[in-house]
Image (tube, rainbow, N blue to C red):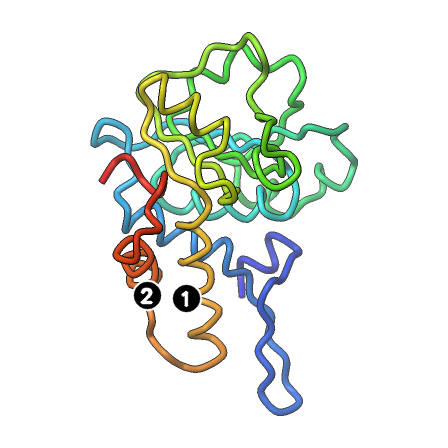
Amino acid sequence: QKEVELLGAVNTIHFDGKLRRGYNTDCTGMQKLVVDQKIDYDQELIRHTYVIGAGPAGRAVALGCSGTVTSVVQIYSRTTIHPWMDNWPGIRYLPAVSICDYAGSEDSWYQGDLIINATPLGGGEHAHESPWPQGTPLPTHSWVIDLNYHPHVSRFLHDAKKAGNKTMNGLGLLCYQAADSFNIWTGSDVTGKELLDYLIAEGHDAALSDGR
């Protein structure tokens, strides 16, 4: 899978006799999610996508976005940019994708048309935290996605929605990547949209998408 070569990360393995194939369904799931859920910016091409977090999840969704709705993807690393990031194949083959330092870049963040939190901040034991720098104004007409989904409405999403943005939590991507993995293993053709619509019908729709 081309995505695996570019990301250097696998989250789904298919065993076919002695043959093993690796896939990254976070990337392919993100590609389908942004198209199916009509994640756009005032019905136009998203010009700037900012991904907070340079770990495997951040790189996967950045690569997924780079092949769909956006023209420029910037990944913001919360830790020191290590040499391996400069050698990451996704940087070499995708000129629209770049990795930047988290610190000192806050002044430009409000320009993001699609902002994705791919860090643990906002979920689990970090539920009270937000990846957004304190004192930095949020945009007001953007899409904001938090890959965390417990709690359904993170502090980041709460603040983003209050500022006037469309928001979505991580259940959307979870459904789409799960559908891709399930289909790889079983040969089925379940779609992420079917899984997401089922969750919504069952009442699990908190913060899935304000843009519907």
Residue at 58% x, 12% y: name it. 134
| Residue highlighted by disc 1 | 179
| Mark drawn on residue 70 | none
Which secondary structure, mark 1?
Answer: helix
Q: Residue furthest bottom?
A: 17
Residue 4 percent location from the top left of the image = 59, 60
| Residue highlighted by disc 2 | 191
Residue 48 percent location from the top left of the image = 42, 27
Count neighbours of disc 2 (C-alpha within 10 A) and say few if under 14, some if 14 to 19, many if 20 or more.
some
Query: Residue 136, relative to residue 57: is it above or below?
Result: above
Q: Are marks 2 and 1 in contact (CB under 8 Å)?
A: yes
Which secondary structure, mark 2?
Answer: loop
Residue 13 percent location from the top left of the image = 60, 73
Amino acid type of disc 1?
Ala
Residue at 49% x, 29% y: name it. 50
Q: Quadrant of residue 169?
A: top left
Query: In the picture provided, is 27 more to the left or to the right than 172?
Result: right
| Distance of label 2 from label 1 (alpha carbons) | 6 Å
Going from N to C along the chain, the mark reached first, 2 or 1, is: 1
Which quarter shows the N terminus? bottom right
